[in-house]
Image: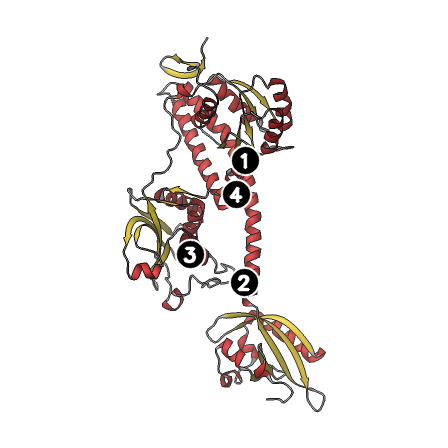
Amino acid sequence: MKDYIFIEDLPVMVLEMAPDGRVVNTNEALSRSFGYSRDELVSLNIADLVPESQSDRLLESIARAVSEGTANAELILQTKAGRSLHVRADMLAVRGPDGGIAEITAFLTDITQKRLLEEQLLQAQKMSSVGLLTAGVAHDFNNILATILLASQMINMEVQEDSVLKRQAKSIQSSAESGAELASQLLSFAGSSTSGPRIVSPNDLVNDIANLSKPCLDNSISIEFHLDPNVRNIVADRNQIAQVVLNLALNAKDAMKSGGTLTFTTEDVQVAEGILSRSLDIVQGDYVRISVSDTGEGIDEENITSIFEPFFTTKDSKQGTGLGLSVALGIIRKYGGGIDVKSKLNEGTTFALYIPSSTKPELARVDNDDMEALCGSEHILVVDDRDEVRSSASQMLELWGYRVSSAADGIAAIEMYKDLRSEVDALLMDLRMPGIDGIETHRRLKEIDDSVVVVLTSGYGLEQLEQKASSQGVAGFIKKPYKIEQLLSLLRRILDGRRAATGNPCRKHVRGGTHLAFTPEG
């Protein structure tokens, strides 16, 4: 060892090499990081530690150190086990007694984790941009669906029961509802909708994820379901659990490069005190087990103990950062659960989510068969910048007995309310409008009349804005596209709660036994 440098005492990895790249000496830090003994290293050329894609960069760095005396570069080196290390290499040329370059000393700093964090940040920024774009598209899509859904429902109520037009209207309505569900899922996964913990049906969640992941699957991959129809519900943020299940489904897809079967399973299980509860770090009790299985390449024993570690991945850097499973485990543990994994090479893998079960039922969906009870005679001001949405909502409210005025934006609504303040009972207002949005419009309306009743609607996810709007006294929220009965039920609940009932103001009009509309008495 040279007396002018004590490489063994340095905290960084040090490698001394000849100008042609032959390794002359190393320190223990480098030997330990790369898994080679010193004897093994001094029998190598530094080029042996560099993948072919990095060879030109390495040669350029050595040449620069020889000509200029110093050089630095970022390189990807390979350990003895084949693992890649991102390093910063600071090279110093050492001259011999004759003035020529005798050796080059390279000081190597491991920056692997730093690079992974930077890649994760870039990915997060990219996904944020994708999320904003998705939310915007979903908003416009929902506005279109709102018109289709309302129109198809009204046609459905106007025509004869056994007519071809009736069947077509039902088909249009069903397609619009499917489109609305897809848009809702896209908003959830884009991060534009956060619901918080609530009662969730595991089977509904799994079916949604299966439908969402189908376009990502190759035709050689089939999907099977083993869903217990009586499985209990869970209490969690639906979007977070959905993200976990989707992540597992996409991982399963990646493991079946030659095709196979993706299987979703739901079942109730009871975990007793024992090996399973200790390995999952969960308490004994009743759980729902949601399993995602594949028939892919499997995970070897060496890797299976590390798969939940942050940044650990068996994929290359272009496929993932190794944060998916660690984040998934964190989410499931937040709700008192755990994740179990079983795998065999070339036979497949099963990830099982254990989440505490709940006996509480899901909130009943709005479905009021007594449509006559949803009629009204109040005056509603409809505010929406989309002409077709404003027109459809206005026509629908008029069919159910309401008197309707309309405005194309917040400023127009404020001016109209000043003139009609004594007549308008409530406003149905879009959240996102040019000029001023629904929340700001509501704030200005309250300055005119503190008792103003406003129902906000939007094609975006509304949850993140509900708290702010509720603090201002917004009476209610409804997400586009909505069904007729959903809006009517909400309006009646709000209006009836504001004043004592005055009797049913509507009567049912019937022609040939077919429901046409509801209109005010007299």
Q: Amino acid at mark 1?
A: Ser
Q: Nearer the viewer, mark 3 or mark 4?
A: 3
The residue that label 2 is drawn on is 116
Seen at 40% across and 43% down, the residue is 208
Q: Which residue sits furthest bottom? A: 97
The image shows residue 250 at horizontal and vertical percentages of 43, 53
Distance from the alpha carbon under mark 3 to that under mark 2 = 19 Å
| Precedes in sequence: disc 4 or disc 1 | 4
Vertical placement of 168 versus 107: above or below? above
Question: Tag 4's secondary structure?
Answer: loop
Compared across the picture, whether 297 is left or right of 65 comes to left
Seen at 33% across and 40% down, the residue is 360
Q: Quadrant of residue 326?
A: bottom left
The image shows residue 487 at horizontal and vertical percentages of 46, 27
Label 4 near label 3: C-beta < 8 Å?
Answer: no
**Residue 198 seen in render:** yes
The residue that label 3 is drawn on is 329
The residue that label 1 is drawn on is 471
| Precedes in sequence: disc 3 or disc 2 | 2
